[in-house]
Structure formats: C-alpha cells, structure tokens
Image (cartoon, rainbow, N blue to C red):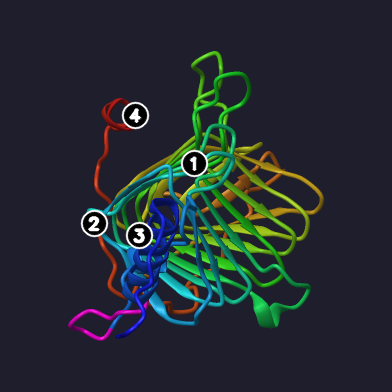
Amino acid sequence: MPAVLRLTSSAAAAVLTLLLLSVRSVSSVLVDDNNDFTLERSLQLNSNVTILNDGAVHTINEKFYKKSFHVRNTTLILEKGGTLTAAEDWPGIRLVTSSTFNMNGGIVQGWQDTPAVELHNGQSSDDTASFADIYGGAIIGGKSVDGVGGDAFYVHGFGTKANIFGGLFMGGIGQDDNMEGLSIIVQNFASVHIYSGSFQGEMEVGKGSNIIFYGCFLQYGATITGEFVDGTQLDVVVKTKNDGTVSLIAVSEQVCDTQPSMQPTGFPTISPRPTPAFSYGEMMRPSLISASILLTLLL
C-alpha cells in the first residue's frame, strides 16, 4: 500500500502559497501573441518601481498610478493613452546609461518635489549618453505640500541630448500654489534642442550645457520671446549657471520679422542663416492643453 503524506493545515497553506508563487513566476516569463514582453510582466513582485534593463523596446499606452520606471540601456516609448503618476520619492521615469526615450503622447507627473522625467548618462563618457525625442503629451513636475514644486524634465550628463518637437512641459506647483518648479533643467555637459512646445515654468541651464531654440526669437536678459517654425509662441525665462549657454538658431524654413538676437548689447547678435538642415522625423504639431484642466484631472 503506497505511503500517504498527511499535511497539517499550516503546512498545506505553505505548500499552496509556494504553488501560487510558482504560477506567478511562470506567468512572468510568458510572451504575448507578438512574442513581446508586456510591462506588467516586467514588474517586480510587491514593488512600485519597474526596472527595465534588457536592451529591448518597451511601450507604455495604459494608466499607472504611483508607479515609476527605472530604465537602463533600454528604449522606452510613451504613447497617447499612457498616463503615469510617479511612485513616492521617485521621478515618473528615470533613464540612465545608454537609454532612449520617445514620447508621442501621454502624461507623466512627478512625485511632489521630484522631477517627472529624468534623462541621465550615469557615466563619465559620451559613449554612454542617453537620448530623447519628444513630439507631444505632457510632462509635469510634482506638486509640493511643503516646499518648491518638482521640475518637469531634467537632462544631465556628458553627451546626453533631448530633442523637443512639441508637448507641454510644466513645473510643479509649490506650497503657496505658485508654479515654482522648472519646466526644463539641463546640467553637466548635456543639451536640449527645442523646435516647438509649450513651457510653463522657468528653465535652467548649468555646467557646460546648452539649450538651443530653433525659430524666430529675441533674448533680453534672461527672457526669451518669439515663435517656433510651426507658429507656436514662446515666452520663457532661462537662467544660466556655471558656463551654461543659450543659443538662438534661425531656421531656413521660417521667415522672421526680426532675426534671432541677444540683448542688451550695443548691437543685436544675429544668428547665422541658413542653418544646417535637420530632420523633424515624424513631427507632430503640439496640442493645446489647458494647464488648469490638466492639473484638475491629475491632482
């Protein structure tokens, strides 16, 4: 007669738990009909931060609340319909070391004083720079309850580069209900190239970095005003620190009433014309987004 293994109730519960965990573990490596991993299957058990470090391409087109993504040596795409509110004490998306971020739509909001999106090199060589192309959507710094609101988009590190073709960049709201977070901050030998977009909140460019605006612009002190090639208006304050620079570049596709110039000087500094040709890729015209309505929906 075969031996019968009898389990106590507590032992049986333990076995059942192990079986359930095994099932979850197996499901985490299943692939979908397109032989591609989904984001939910990349989540760490009981974690509110998803680590993507497989060199693959991942797409967000759904809603995540109090969830953040840490991306390394991997490509992340945010599509229309993707909404991400960051986990506590985390940016919504942090990309480091040879990562790529493409944003075609969607919304990312940071946690309180933290930036919404961070783009980093993570090393001390241009070879490990990260890159971003942003065509639309909204990036919003976290709202603070006891301090300054979070920055929207933080770009940092040797050779790291972001191209902005559209979208809303909005600094976080501070404790006094004033917009105190930066819309863009660039540090440590990085660069941001801006071809269009809506920017609410000041910008800052620091140590060896550069922000380049393409279109018809005038700079008086720290204030830059003018128009992008698609007709979008710009009026923003850009603060420079530690040899950070601002460049105004005229575009051959656009006829300016006044050439880009920087004042006060004895004479305007005219940007060269024509500039080297550049590609807009699949450029999308920026959507007009009401900041007040957007904040009402998100906060």
Nearest to the eye among marks 2 and 3: give it.
Answer: 2
Give the labeled residue for mark 2. 80
Identity of the residue furthest to the right in this view: 242
Residue 200, image x, y percentages:
45, 35
Give the labeled residue for mark 3. 255
Indicate whether 240 appears above or below 251. Answer: above
Question: Is residue 29 visible from the viewing direction of this image?
Answer: yes
Identity of the residue furthest to the left in this view: 33
Residue 266, image x, y percentages:
72, 43
The three-letter code of the residue at mark 4 reads: Leu
Of residue 23 and residue 42, the one placed in the foreground of this image is 23
Q: How many residues crowd around disc 2 within 10 Å: few (fewer than 14), some, or many (20 or more)?
A: some
Give the number of the disc on residue 295.
4
Q: Earlier in the sequence, mark 1 or mark 3?
A: 1
Residue 219, image x, y percentages:
58, 43
Q: How many residues crowd around disc 4 within 10 Å: few (fewer than 14), some, or many (20 or more)?
A: some
Q: Are marks 1 and 3 in contact (CB under 8 Å)?
A: no
Identity of the residue furthest to the front in this view: 1
Question: Is residue 253 visible from the viewing direction of this image?
Answer: no
Q: Earlier in the sequence, mark 2 or mark 1?
A: 2
Q: Determine whether the residue tagged by mark 4 lies in a helix, strand or loop.
A: helix
The three-letter code of the residue at mark 2 reads: Lys
Give the Cα distance between marks 1 and 4: 12 Å
Q: Residue drawn at (50%, 46%), measured in percent from left and top?
A: 116
Q: Quadrant of residue 283?
A: bottom left
Q: Are marks 4 and 2 in contact (CB under 8 Å)?
A: no
Give the labeled residue for mark 1. 110
- Residue 244 placement, left or right of 60: right
